[in-house]
Image (cartoon, helix red, strand yellow):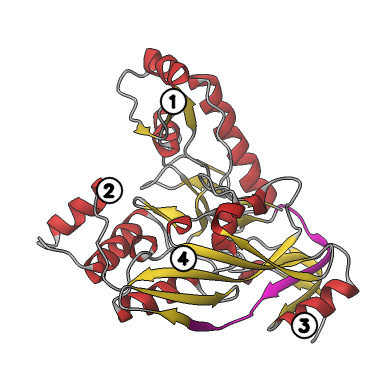
Amino acid sequence: MKILENHSLASLNTFGVEQKARYFATAQNTQEFLALVRQYENPRILGGGSNILITRDLDGLVIKNEIKGISIIGEDDRYARIRVCGGENWHEFVKWAVAKGWGGIENLSLIPGTLGAAPIQNIGAYGVEIKDVLQVVEALDRTTGSIVHFQNAECRFGYRHSLFKEPAQRDRYFILSATLQLDKQPQVNTRYADVERKLHELKIEHPNIRDVHRAVIEIRQKKLPDPARLGNAGSFFKNPVLTEEQYRQLQSVKPDAPHYPFTHTFVKVPAGWLIDQAGWKGKQMGRVGCYEKQALVLVNLGGASGAEIWDFAQKVREDVQEKFGILLEPEINIW
């Protein structure tokens, strides 16, 4: 293993911000990771760099997870159980599953990042979350050096939430792999309005998982900028979850406010809609802006620092809270 000093992270985060790590290394297997953890205190773990905003140069060690491997560990006529290592690219794994005709994750196509980050965030899109197919998370407990396994229920999954994001557990576990159960006789999920519209546009009446995979990719490519051309981390804020009383208060200001059922007592409101209604869609300040096609996406217009992007995000949050009484929470991790 080679330890690099004062290493640029610009090419390793999709915002493209130029910040440095005091020390940097890659781990290509569990043994390498263990050696690094024993040598350096509280290292940060970097996957695809697609769900972070780096606001400053980082002290200590940053480890890039490059532990790879996809293996079929069990299957029958109906299901296949797949163990996927944490350094695998998520979208490439989705393509692998779709090519085999195995369903359950096609709605999660083109989500950037690695498998290791997926359970932490409980990634979700178009009516599906990873918790719907995940069975086991294998992780290294950095406090004890032991490998532990979490069953689905033990992960405490919620909306963009898991045990691994809770304050008491944050940064404790390094995810080595996840075991997913995919359906060999899949029933497609096309309930999400955007997916239905895209399939109709493509003149597909009886879609299979390949059709849904294609539709989701086309939807995301139309809505979201390519980080290689315009630095971004996708959706910057979570969709806020409101009580019925909070939603009624919002309706008093915006009677046409869209909402979606969350539980029998809570509803979810699109954060992008709130930001748009507050007048931020397409707005720019210096080298940072709100994407013109999707208000939920903040973009680096060229040369912006992480601190500049975070300052812009704070202004958006403050304005939305002032106008609608709702405080938006970042979906991405702030370093």
Residue type marked 2: Tyr
Above or below, 64 relative to 327? below
- Badge 2 marks a residue whose secondary structure is loop
| Viewer-proximal residue among 210 and 295 | 210
Q: Are marks 1 and 3 in contact (CB under 8 Å)?
A: no
Residue that mark 3 sits on? 32
Whole-angstrom CA distance, mark 1 to mark 3, is: 47 Å
Q: Of tags 1 and 4, which is closer to the observer?
A: 1
Residue at the image position 52 percent from the left and 76 percent from the top: 83
At label 3, which amino acid type do we have? Glu
Label 4 vs label 3: CA separation?
A: 34 Å
Contact? badges 1 and 2 (CB < 8 Å): no
Residue 265's mark? 1
Q: Earlier in the sequence, mark 3 or mark 2?
A: 3
Of the image marks 1 and 4, the number of the one nearer the N terminus: 4
> What's the amino acid at mark 1?
Thr
- Measure the alpha-carbon separation of dots 4 and 2: 28 Å
Q: Amino acid at mark 4?
A: Arg
* Residue at numbered disc 4: 229
Determine if the magenta segment contains residue 225. no
Q: State the SS at label 1.
A: loop
Q: Main secondary structure of the magenta part?
A: strand
